[in-house]
Image: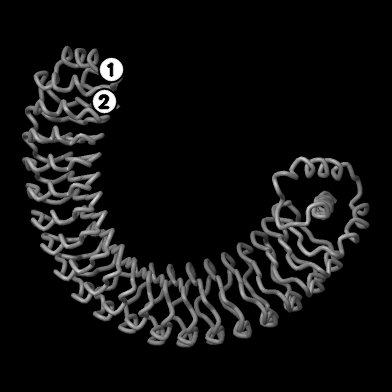
Amino acid sequence: MASKIRLGMAFLLVAFFIAPAWSSSKEGEKKKIVSQIKKLGEADALDPELRKLTRLTELDLEDVKISILPSGIGKLTDLRRLNLTDNYLTTLPPDIGKLTNLEWLAVGQNEITVPSEIGKLSNLKRLELDHNYFSKLPPEIGKLTKLEWLNLERNKLATIPPEIGKLRNLKLLNLNGNKLTKLPPEIGKLTKLGRLVLSRSKLTTLPPEIGKLTKLERLDVDRNKLNTLPPEIGKLTKLKRLNLGQNRLTIPPEIGKLTNLEWLAIDYNNFLKLPPEIGTLTKLELLDLEANSLAKLPPEIGKLWNLKLLDLNNNQLTTLPPEIGNLVSLERLRLRRNKLTTLPQEIGWLTNLEGLVLNRNKLTTLPAGIGGLTNLEGMHLDYNQLTTLPPEIGKLTSLKRLKVTFNQLTTLPREIGGLTNLEGANFEYNKLTRLPREIGRLKNLKWLYLQNNKLTALPPEIGELRTLTALYLGDNPITDADLDSLNSLINLQWLDLRGTKVTKQGVAALRLALPKCTIQSDFDKKRP
């Protein structure tokens, strides 16, 4: 009885506001109506109100907590849009089939099974059935020949009826998050399809008929169990975005025929080789190759002149081809967790590069060409085997973040003072014995990490870093003699002196000089 009352309440509300959603200006009036309707004791008293709505064209019942629709819904024959999203529905009444003028039906986030009467909605253009967890789609779905948008995301479909091929006007088909192991060959009849989402299923193959979807611009097949792609994939020449991540693929040469591709993800597939045909994809702006087993890149990679992001994290690369320098549009280059021992001099040709990630490789040196990266804003070199940084690093005048932790650095070049836009620098866990006096020229530096080095003294110029807010000096053998230069750091908020040779008296004096700064030392009562 209570659920019927809530349903009647929703119908009455729409009688006052015939729109897809409630406007904030009507919230007060809405609350009054709700209050009045809650006083009604019998659901039957609402039936006359329902009959008054026969000319209603739009009905929004999203998230009104209904668990049933009355058969009377079939009286609203002028309805064009019906939104039943996010309720407790387990079924739709047979009378739903009488809404033959319906063009948009949303029943997502319920627990329904799809009735055969759905096939009577012959004017339907958009159908949302996502997040219902049903396991079967009735063959009557094929009667919805005007359908342009079909969302079946997050259900339990293991198969798709062959009648799906009759939806010749379909432009979007979303099957993300189902249990599909294969697609019917009739999928190839959806020749107007512009986007096909097949992510998060159990597909092991794609039918060759996939090649007939020649208007397809976006295809998502990530998180499946694909071992191969059919050669017909090369016929999808209008594709702009292709997501093949998290499968078990090797990449066929036909990939090179997709010359309109702008976005290609083939991450987490564990393939060993990238075909040279990759070089024909000259419109590519993003190429994600993370977590494969690539030991080298083909020189044709250098033909991707429009590439802006190249992700090669978690591979087996020992070197990069000199052609990498031809990627003149590149803005982000990610090479974390490889086996690189050197970088080519041509890396410096990437003058538009803004982010360079080289963590966890085996680099012992950086090439002088690194100085050509004049637009670089962030560089990560953690967990390598660098003993020094080249003087050319001082030419990176746009650099804001520099991380070189867990290396073997013993000194920093004087040219480091040229990084006048640097805001953060991290040199933790190296073997630094001293800092260059030029460090005082880093007028925009806000945080500086120097823990776990072998610094025995600090240059007086460190006191010129007036923008510094955080300074970590822990686990270095510095003494009280170095503290005087810190007195002028008026914006310092955090200072770590744990594991140093400073005395309790030295810490006390520094706290007087910097009353707004939190200072951690070995003399604190509790060490975090």
CA neighbours of label 2 inside 10 A, class few (<14), some (14 to 19), many (20+): many
Q: Position of residue 394 (x, y in %)?
A: 12, 46
Instruction: Give me the residue at 74% from left, 65% from top.
Output: 91
Coloring scheme used: one colour
Decide: is 89 above or below 161. Answer: above
Which amino acid is tagged 1? Answer: Lys
- Answer with the quarter of the image where residue 34 lies: top right
Q: Secondary structure at mark 1?
A: loop
Give the SS element for disc 2. Answer: loop
Q: Which residue is mark 1?
A: 525
Vertical arrangement, residue 504 with respect to residue 232, above or below = above
Q: Quadrant of residue 327?
A: bottom left
Residue at horizontal 28 percent and vertical 67 percent from the top:
292
The picture quadrant where one finds residue 37 is: top right
- Disc 2 designates what residue? 492
Q: Is residue 461 left or right of residue 240?
A: left
Q: Earlier in the sequence, mark 2 or mark 1?
A: 2
